Amino acid sequence: MKILVVEDEVRLAEALQQILVKNRHAADLEHNGVSGLDQALTGLYDVIILDIMLPKMNGIEVLRQLRKAGIATPVLLLTARDEASDKVSGLDSGADDYLTKPFNTEELLARVRALGRRRGAPIADDQLKFGDTTLDLSTYELACHDKSVRLGMKEFQIMEIFMANGSRIAGKEDLLSKVWGYDSEAEYNNLEVYVSFLRKKLAHIHSPVVIRTVRGVGYALSQEESGT
Ligand code: CA
């Protein structure tokens, strides 16, 4: 998806951009309300992440002007604190969702995906594919032809990394730090358990994709030839 981030804290804006790009979105940045509104008015975006406290024009006013101009792009408002009054005036002005700072990355991505769905963003943007098998990033469904199965949160996070790497090796340290936040022997055993769940689910949907163990290193996907 194409996302506009309007946030005057440059470091936070850049961190958001990095997170979004890493998750296969395109992200443009604006650092004040006036330039943010100008960009938003182009109507080029699938989702707008809009800070409330902005120089030149505050986020609520940006939103008001945007809706007045007939631009219906879903807007996720960022609030500094959990301020009820901000939320109420934001909702009145046509915000679609809120996130209170500080927020966690997964939460942000989940909200952005949900807003993108509302807009009806192309499905291709919301899926990872390896061979005949797809992983839906918003419903957590793993599917192959007409069969599908829903993944749990951890299974999904692991499968998302596998699919993004495809036939390249996903290192176990990398998996542990991305999914659990740190690596330890205990978590490595957990990882193996989740990988075995994923293998069962792949078999369940008759996917020809297999998760190969690269001993001591990590895992990689490969697709078996059909009919063998
Ligand atoms: Ca701000």
Image (spheres, rainbow, N blue to C red):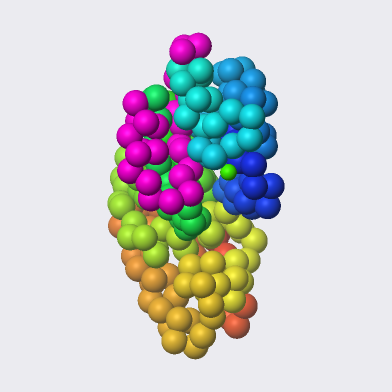
Query: Residue reaching furthest bottom?
Result: 185
Q: Was residue 73 drawn as part of the magenta stretch in this picture?
A: yes
Residue drawn at x 58%, y 18% as measured from the top left: 41
**What span is colored magenta in the figure?**
68-92
Question: Which of the 4 image quarters holds residue 29?
Answer: top right
**Residue 45, x across and y down, in percent:** 56, 26
Q: Is residue 109 above or below residue 27?
A: below
Residue drawn at x 33%, y 43% as measured from the top left: 84
Q: Nearer the viewer, residue 12 or 119?
A: 12
Q: Was residue 79 drawn as part of the magenta stretch in this picture?
A: yes
Q: Is residue 66 above or below residue 125?
A: above
**Residue 12, x across and y down, in percent:** 62, 51
Q: Nearer the viewer, residue 41 or 23?
A: 41
Q: Is residue 47 visible?
A: yes
**Residue 7, x across and y down, in percent:** 61, 41
Please state, as top left, top right, bottom left or bottom right, where the N terminus lies in the image.
top right
